[in-house]
Image (cartoon, helix red, strand yellow):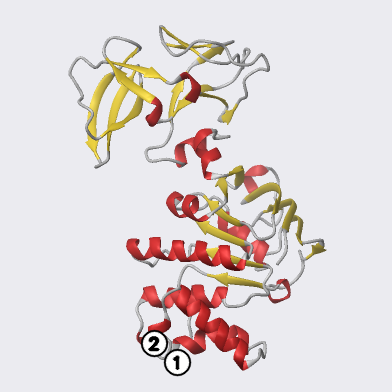
Amino acid sequence: MASITLENLAHSYHPNPGGDDDFALKAVNYTWEDGRAYALLGPSGCGKTTLLNIISGLLTPTHGRVLFADEDVTASSTAARNIAQVFQFPVVYDTMTVEQNLAFPLRNRRMEASYVAERVGRIAEMIGLQADLKKKARGLTSDLKQKISLGRGMVRDDVNAILFDEPLTVIDPHMKWELRTQLKSLHREFNHTMIYVTHDQTEALTFAEKVVVMHEGRVVQIGTPKELFETPAHSFVGYFIGSPGMNFVPVSVAGNKARLGDETIKLTHDYGNPNGDLKLGIRPEFISLTKGVGLPVRINRVQDVGRHKFINAALFDTEINIAVEEGFEIETDMTNVILDPDKVSIFCDDWRIDAQSAGKIDGGAT
């Protein structure tokens, strides 16, 4: 196993790239720590697979280097990097049994028969394939075939990293939860460095210790699920994490006050006098629907999703979402909202800005 360092890494599919727009992967510098579980999260086309393919050696970057520990592997083949990969669609040998499929990476390296049997048995038990070991892969369902792919990726204990590229796409929702749980157990037991590519925030947040969020070819934030939810570094993170995502309201900001239409929102910190496209961000969970106190809103619709209700409302010209408990009674004279001042973020040109060093100011949203 090894740490993986990306040093001034960038990639373009154009033969002669010019500006940022020509790069599918914009400059990134980061070290993936040995033995940690990471997720690469973002929508289709954001650069996740490009980055994963560079790490795996399937793609040579336009700029920068990839290091495993202190060794420069930028020009090394996938085989030379000593990694395991699991792809979006199951890759199995149909004429082999499940046992033979799982054992193939070990037998290919001429491991001792006793070691092969022990590893195959252990992995099969952890991913629930013990009863299928003697079956031919040809007749198995897509779910079971993908389990074989996952198991084959995990069966070696000498790899530098295990890379997963949307591995649960073909799996039904109940099985997805089960396999994510099993992957976490396998990670805890074997301590492999794992990088998991997905567009599904639930998969990323429940699997990874740290999530790398990508947007339009750029890494916009790397953090724990808690950090991404509470302190998004970019408006895209706020929008993409959470269901529904963060609300964004255009404002002007001076010191510890934000102006929205004719209303003033008192902030708990001094933000100075930022220039640019300013937005106030707040999650639906931190907005309270009230009677006559706070900012005026007009309720558009209510969606009951079981444990919660989501209220869609108009705050001046901006639609916002408010989350309330299932039993919350929405009365006709509830036409105002209060924003939790400790949960407000201010964004300038889509990037979160820090409050000035003056510290916290007493007060709240009006």
Task: Give the mark, 2 or 1, whose residue is nearer the N terminus.
Answer: 1
Element at label 2: helix
Q: Residue drawn 60% across and 58% down?
A: 50
Depth check: give the residue in front, 191 or 76: 191
Cβ–Cβ below 8 Å for labels 2 and 1? yes
Q: Residue drawn 36% across and 66% down?
A: 175
Residue 122 lies, in percent from the top left, at: 52, 79
Q: Is residue 84 visible?
A: yes
Kindly identify which residue carries mark 1.
95
Q: Quadrant of residue 119?
A: bottom right
Q: Residue drawn 45% across and 92% down?
A: 95
Element at label 1: loop
User: Marks 2 and 1, how far apart in space?
Assistant: 6 Å
Which numbered circle lies on residue 193? none
Packing grade of label 2 (10 A; few <14, some 14-19, many >=20) is some
Q: Quadrant of residue 37?
A: bottom right
Q: Where 147 falls versus 210 (above or below)? A: below
Depth check: give the residue in front, 219 or 186: 186
In the picture, measured across the screen, residue 27 lies left or right of residue 235, that is: right
Which amino acid type is marked by label 2?
A: Arg
Packing grade of label 1 (10 A; few <14, some 14-19, many >=20) is few
Residue 308 lies, in percent from the top left, at: 28, 37
Q: Is residue 23 visible?
A: no
Kindly identify which residue carries mark 2.
138
Residue at the extreme top of the image, as rendered:
262
Which amino acid type is marked by label 1?
A: Thr
